[in-house]
Image (spheres, helix red, strand yellow):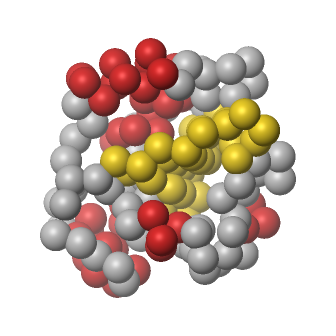
Amino acid sequence: MAYVRRDQCDQHYAQDRGFRRVGQAERALLAEHVPAPANGRALDAGCGTGELAAYLGELGYLVDAVDFADSALARARAERAGAVGVRWLCLDVGHDDPAELSEDGYDLITLRLVYPSSATGSGSCTRSPGGCARAARSW
């Protein structure tokens, strides 16, 4: 199931629904291949309920967790209240003003279960020199 409109995503999360959980294999791959550098910054675009953002915080990243669905972020703040180093932002990174995002770019950009083209419209997702981007999908 894919949603491309804000109201559809908002309704999905408001109904206490979610998407595929972050599995142990994904966690292991992230820990091995993209360990957080000192003061590393990560952008989790389309963070949903924040499971991946919270894990990236555990790895040592300072995370901007972004979603355009208010209900997803409300759940993320409640379900991940103890997340360390995570800043929750309601933003459509493909269309909204990117002023709240890091001006210095990111060491890691994740687009998990997000159509990558939906996050590149404004060019607001920039990597730091030497940074990387990761997209994971299940469709």
**Residue 29: x and y, percent?**
37, 23
Q: Left or right: 25 with respect to 30?
A: left
- Looking at this view, is 102 or 16 the one in front? 102
Write down the quadrant of residue 79 in the picture. top left
* Residue at 69 percent of width and 69 percent of height: 123
- Looking at this view, is 122 or 60 the one in front? 122
- Looking at this view, is 84 or 40 the one in front? 40
**Residue 107: x and y, percent?**
67, 36
**Screen quadrant of the N terminus:** bottom left
Q: Is residue 129 above or below residue 113?
A: above
Q: Is residue 115 above or below residue 35?
A: below
* Residue at 44 percent of width and 59 percent of height: 46
**Residue 51: x and y, percent?**
36, 39
- Looking at this view, is 49 or 37 the one in front? 37
**Screen quadrant of the C terminus:** bottom left
Q: Left or right: 109 with respect to 69?
A: right
Which residue ends up furthest to the right in the rendered image? 103
* Residue at 33 percent of width and 74 percent of height: 10
Q: Is residue 71 visible?
A: yes
Give the tally of numbered discs.
0
Q: Is residue 7 above or below residue 107?
A: below
**Residue 58: x and y, percent?**
49, 21
Q: Left or right: 120 with respect to 22?
A: right
Which residue ends up furthest to the front in the rendered image? 130
Q: Is residue 50 above or below residue 125?
A: above
Q: Is residue 49 visible?
A: no
* Residue at 27 percent of width and 36 percent of height: 22
